[in-house]
Amino acid sequence: MESPESWFHRRATHFVEAQVLFHLNQAGVLQTLRQGPCTAAEVARTLDLDPAVTGTLLDYVFGIDDLLDRNDAGQYSLSAFGDQVLARYSDSQSDKEKSSINMFDVRVGAYGPVWQRLGGMLKKEVRHGIDFHREGRFAEKGVTKLARHFAGTICEAIDHLDIETALEIGTTTGLLAQLSERRPGLALYGLDKSSRALDETKEALHLEHCDAHLIQADFLDVSGWAGNIKSERPGLIFSLHFHEILAQGVDRLVGALRELQQRLPGWVVLALEQPRLPHSERGSLEETLWLYGQSNILIHHLIGNGRILSREGWVELGELAGCLKVTDTSCGYLGYRAFTYHL
């Protein structure tokens, strides 16, 4: 069993190192070290950074972690383990120079303002969304990277259901481009209430030479967008963001599903969600899965921008909406499941 002293210093070190690695990555230091050994001064000169601060931070990471090596000439480089870490959290594994690295972007970057004001939130002095906001720009790359793991699940549903039209709710995932490539005959739609998200999606689709009809609307306002869908046959509505829609209440989402049954009968809704894991199963689950799940609940419930349901809860949601059939299958990644609601 770990001693109280070891527990304390380990937790404190993890907190500090996460901040250090996030900022080193944002400044381009980790990318520079991927290119080959160099001293802290050389890194600072290349990136126009403060040499003393750069040296102190690299010395700290080298001293407390296994990510870096340092030779007798004082040159830093990624260790074999460090290279594995960066490869795992990079957008591209084939082009090290141009790929971006998601290093604590969500936990430290996007939610940094939340942690800074956590005491005020606890004491009811400040409220997220009114007095301050998270830095969503840091979370977007993380969502895109996460979404890649679900293109196969969506394609399986498309093939199984013989779908010709697909509509994504929340368009910043990059999934529309992936579906266009994997299923070129598919009619694609993207729905988002954010004009900025739609502009970014439009640019990304253009760069990928993909075509999709983009609609600015709130998913819950079904009457405001359903009439724009042109399809003679039932299609698929899918999203990684139904937990965020749930922040507006179960009744509103259930009501939207019921209205969809009237406006788009025969369509299928696919919710790709990581359900809340039972605490009784903690001992039998992989630590990565359990920790990710708890963080997912924390960051959404803390600021009220989402609700994470249990597996039974997601199934019950479709049953409350009166769906003809509700099924759920594993996505094969981090406990995510595909909840299918037949309208």
Image (cartoon, rainbow, N blue to C red):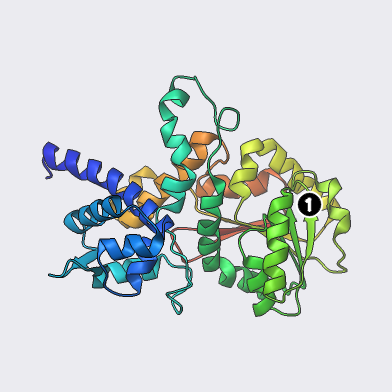
Residue under the image location 57 percent in, 41 percent down: 306
Nearest to the observer: residue 232 or residue 24: 24
- Place of residue 143 in the rendered image (x, y in percent of width and height, measured from the top left): 54, 57
Q: Does residue 158 appear to the left or right of 7 in the view shown?
A: right
Quadrant of the snapshot with the N terminus: top left
Q: Which amino acid does label 1 sit on?
A: Gln
Which residue is pictured at 65% across the width and 44% down the height?
Answer: 245
Q: Quadrant of residue 204?
A: bottom right
Q: Callout 1: few (<14), some (14-19), or many (20+) C-alpha neighbours within 10 Å?
A: some
Count of marks overlaid on the render:
1
Q: In the rendered view of the protein, which quadrant contains the C terminus?
A: bottom right
Residue 330 visible to the viewer: no
172 or 318, which lies in front? 172
Please report the residue visible at 34 percent of the width from the left and 45 percent of the height from the top. Answer: 280
Whether residue 303 is visible to the viewer of this picture, yes or no, is: yes
Horizontal side of 149 relative to 256 (left or right) equals left
Q: With respect to residue 179, does 190 lie above or below?
A: above
**Residue 12 sits in quarter:** top left
Image coords of residue 279 (percent x, y): 36, 43
Reading the image, the residue beneath label 1 is 216
Label 1's element?
A: strand
Instruction: Give the image location of residue 308, x and y in percent.
Output: 52, 44
Q: Nearer the viewer, residue 311 or 295?
A: 295
Q: Position of residue 330 (x, y in %)?
A: 50, 63
